[in-house]
Image (cartoon, helix red, strand yellow):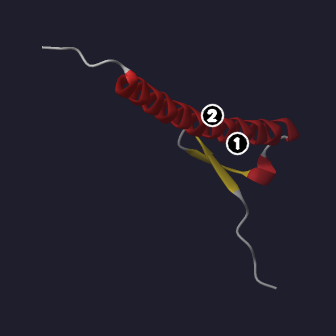
Amino acid sequence: MADQKAQTVTIDGKEYGRDDLSDNARTQITNLRVTEQEIARLQQQLAIAQTARTAYANALKAELPQEAH
């Protein structure tokens, strides 16, 4: 069986072995990862909403009466 490199995490430029961290520290790492994923998901949702808003604004402009010059 080949030796596997222990999992590490880098925090503020310093590398820590996952097995060297407390249970609470590992829980906080999990919490950070979950929140980072949620932020990424929300950013995608915001991009979708902004694109839809632009499309609606353009559709509205197309429906406005043309002004005579």
Q: Amino acid at mark 1?
A: Arg
* Location of residue 32 in the rendering, given as x and y in whole percent from the top left corner: 70, 36
Report the side of 22 relative to 43 (left or right). Answer: right
Residue at 78%, 49% in the rendered image: 20
Q: Which residue carries the number 2 mark?
A: 42
Find residue 33 and name its label.
Answer: 1
Report the side of 37 relative to 46 (left or right). Answer: right
* Location of residue 58 in the rendering, given as x and y in whole percent from the top left corner: 39, 29
Q: Amino acid at mark 2?
A: Leu
Residue at 39%, 24% in the rendered image: 63
Report the side of 20 relative to 52 (left or right). Answer: right
The image quarter containing residue 67 is: top left
Report the side of 48 relative to 20 (left or right). Answer: left
User: Please, what secondary structure does the residue beneath circle 2 have?
Assistant: helix
Q: Nearer the viewer, residue 61 or 31?
A: 61
* Location of residue 40 in the rendering, given as x and y in whole percent from the top left corner: 60, 40
Distance from Cα at disc 1 to Cα at disc 2: 14 Å
User: Please, what secondary structure does the residue beneath circle 1 have?
Assistant: helix
**The furthest residue to the bottom:** 1
Tell me which label, 1 or 2, sits earlier in the chain. 1
Crowding near the residue tagged with mark 1, few <14, some 14–19, many ≥20 C-alpha atoms within 10 Å: few
